[in-house]
Every structure is written in structure tokens, then in C-alpha cells.
Amino acid sequence: MGAPEPISVQAHLADCLALVRPLPPLELALRDALGCVLAEDVVSPRPLPAFDNSAMDGYAVRVRDVAEAREDSPVGLPVVADVAAGHTGALRLAGGTTVRIMTGAPVPPGAEAVVPVEWTDRGVSHVRIRRCPEPGQHVRRAGEDVRAGDVVLEAGTRLQARHIGVLAAVGRARVRVRPRPRVVVLSTGSEIVEPGLGLEHGQLHDANGFLLASAVQELGAIAYRVAGVPDDAAELSAVLDDQLVRADVIITSGGVSEGAYDTVKEVLQASPAFTGRFVKVAMQPGMPQGAGVLGEDGTPILTLPGNPVSAFVSFEVFVRPALRRMLGEEGPDPLRPRVRAVAEEAWTSAPAKAQYVRAATRLEGGRLLVRPVGGHGSHLVTALARTDCLAVVPVGVGRVEVGDEVDCVLLGPAPAGVS
């Protein structure tokens, strides 16, 4: 009986997404909610601003009292009070008088506008005003920003600093959010050594662990990186058991192919606590993949290949969408945003596989151009530093020619001038 046919990228992505669901919402203090996804619409209980307030340092006036004010013929008014920001006392402006008012201070009833201090002689007990304001000028009206009952933030919003500011402004001290999933990142292989330590012949530093943990953290989840686990079944089993207590999901790299020391595959297939499968996916790089659940609580585990570029591409194509679902941040396209770009050089592709090419874009003459970066080898990791997208060549295409349009998955913001 021959080896099973590779499955499609879409089929394995569906398997990965079926393992996860958004984490149950909980209520967090604002500082702890940064980076989380809102699980509720946030409604302002009051208008913003809550009261009419001054947009300038100056003098609150009735317009008719200063209607005749001119640069060469100022109007003088007695200053009957000072109103600073935070003033809570009852005060009504009487005709023929003014109050000195500071930016943000409540405009007293009876006042119709604010005269900026620059239009005056800056008097303290009596002021000479040289210009007449329009009615309502330099006054921020109550409810001008938000009315009571308005939705200020919608469920599904990823909370950034600016959103936290809005929540505080409407008086929310706590908010209901999807918690950030706890992701254990585990690199396997007896050849792996921690960065900073010397290497012996045949060893390499743990690029995958740091790459994947950083990608998890960049996405907004909580990453726990486990130092490299050697190709020993008993040790790997013990590490997986230990990590289950703190994991909402586990990501492994290495040990999922067909070799004699592919320990991840060996350990999980032999474990009665694992339900899942290992497959070949019709993609390049990243063909060997695995996905399932482990332990009594059914913790999702996604097993990625060990070559750094394969691990990176696998994260982008399969793990990122799964984590976004756990965060409660799904969109119509589970991948990053895509753009169309024009190939500025030719390259070949295996027509039986979807190819994800490390590539770089540039804008020239109003056209977005794309070219591969580095070689095809999935061990060539340094080219990732010069990569800003993955150029996607679909199944059935064996060659990309100069001038062909290619779908590109952006790994960061869109290039300037591209929407």
C-alpha cells in the first residue's frame, strides 16, 4: 500500500481551526486588558464632554456684552471670578461681567463664548477685550464627542493604548475581554543548543524556539518557550506532561517527518492521551505537519517541521489563524492581508504543491513589484530578515514569469501607496 497522498493547505488549515475556539471571556482591569480582544460592545453611560467646557484659556462672556470690541476700541468688563479645570462650584455669568476661565474648565451658564486671552490685556480684576467672538466660539459642547448610550468600542476590537484611553474616558475601570491564550513553544532535537552557548560540530542554536515564541507574542498571545528537548521519547513525554498544566495550546517544531529520530511523531502516536493525525501537506516549504489534542483537557497541539523557514511558514499558514480564533479575532481571511504584486524576476515552483516564497516588495511607477529573497532551501533562515511577504504560487503553476501577477501575504504593514 503506497503512502497517502498529500492533503491540501486548506484541508489542514481546517483541521487546525477545528481544534480551537475562542477562550471564554473574563473581566479584566484596563491595564491588564491591553492586547486582548473585546468580548462586549462598550456603551458610554454619559455624554463626552460631560459639560460645556472651554477650549482656550481666556474669558467667558455674553456676546452682546463685547459686540463693539475692536482692536482700536476695546471693551472693558469686570472679572468677577476665576474658573479653573475641575471647578465644581455653582456660578452663573451675570450680564456686563466676565469670568477668567482655563482650558477644560466648565463654561458657566449665561456665557455664550470664550474670548482667548490673546485678544485681551490679560486683566485679573478688570479686562479689556479687543475682539468679539462668534456665539459658541471656543466652547466644547457637552456630548459633542459622544452621546450617552453611544457605542464607543465594538466587540472584536483588539485593545491598543488608544482604546484603553477611550475606555477610561467613559469611566470604565474593567472590561470584558477574551483572555490571551497561553502558548507553549517547544523545540525538539538533540542538536539544539541555547543561543549564547558554544557549538560543537553538528550542533546549532535554537532559532525555531525564539522565532515561534516571538511570533506568538507579536500576535498578542502569551508565549512560554521551553529550551530544546533532545530526541529522547521518555524525556519528551515528561516535558509534554509538565507543560500541559499551563498551556492553552502547544506548538512543537521538529520530529514530524519520516526519519528514525522523529520523536514528536513517535511519542504522540504512541500516547493514548493524543488524538490527531500526522500528514503531508501539498505545500513548499512545510510539507510534514501534525495536529490534534493532548491530555485530559484536550489541549490543542500543532506540530511543525524543524527547518526554520518551514516552521515560520507553517506558523503563518496554520498556527496564526488558530491563535487568532482563540483570541476572538477572526476575520474573513484567516491569514494576514494579501495584495497583488508583479513578479520582477522569474522562478520555478513544484506544480503539485502550493509554494510560499520568501519575498520582498517595492513600489515603482505606481506598481507593486515582488521578487524572491534567498534560495529555496528551508534551512536558509537569514533571508527572513529581508522578507516582507510570502509570495503564494498556487497548485498547478510550475513557473512564475516576469510580469506575472502573484498573491502576496504581507508580513507587516502594506507598502506606502498600496491599499
Image (tube, helix red, strand yellow):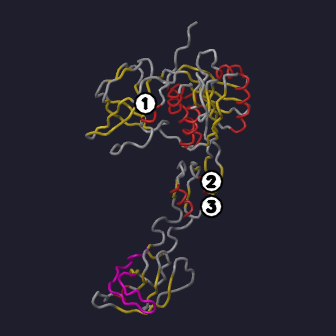
Closer to us: 136 or 205: 205
Mark yes or no: residue 147 visible. Answer: yes
Position of 379 with respect to 290 (left or right) is: left
**Of marks 1 and 2, which one's residue comes earlier in the chain?**
2
Task: Judge whether residue 123 is colored magenta.
Answer: yes
For mark 2, what is the residue? 32
Secondary structure under badge 3?
loop
What secondary structure is found at the residue carrying circle 2? Answer: helix
Q: Position of residue 385 (x, y in %)?
A: 45, 36
Residue name at image x 52 percent, y 17 percent = 6
Task: Give the mark nearer the N terminus: 3 vs 2.
Answer: 2
At label 2, counting other C-alpha atoms closer than 10 Å, the crowd grade (few under 14, some 14-19, many 20 or more) is: few
Q: Amino acid at mark 1?
A: Arg
Q: Position of residue 114 (x, y in %)?
A: 41, 80
Name the residue beneath numbered marker 1: 358
- Residue 348: which quarter of the image? top left
Please name the residue shown 60% across and 29% down the image.
302
Report x, y in % for residue 221.
Answer: 59, 42
What residue range appears in magenta? 117-139
Question: Label 3 belongs to which residue?
Answer: 173
Question: Which tag is nearer the camera, tag 1 or tag 3?
Answer: 1
Q: Nearer the viewer, residue 129 or 234?
A: 234
Q: Residues within 10 Å of mark 3 (few under 14, many from 20)?
A: few
Does 418 sit above or below residue 344? Answer: below
- Measured in 3D between alpha carbons, the distance from the residue under mark 1 to the one under mark 2, in whole angstroms, is 36 Å
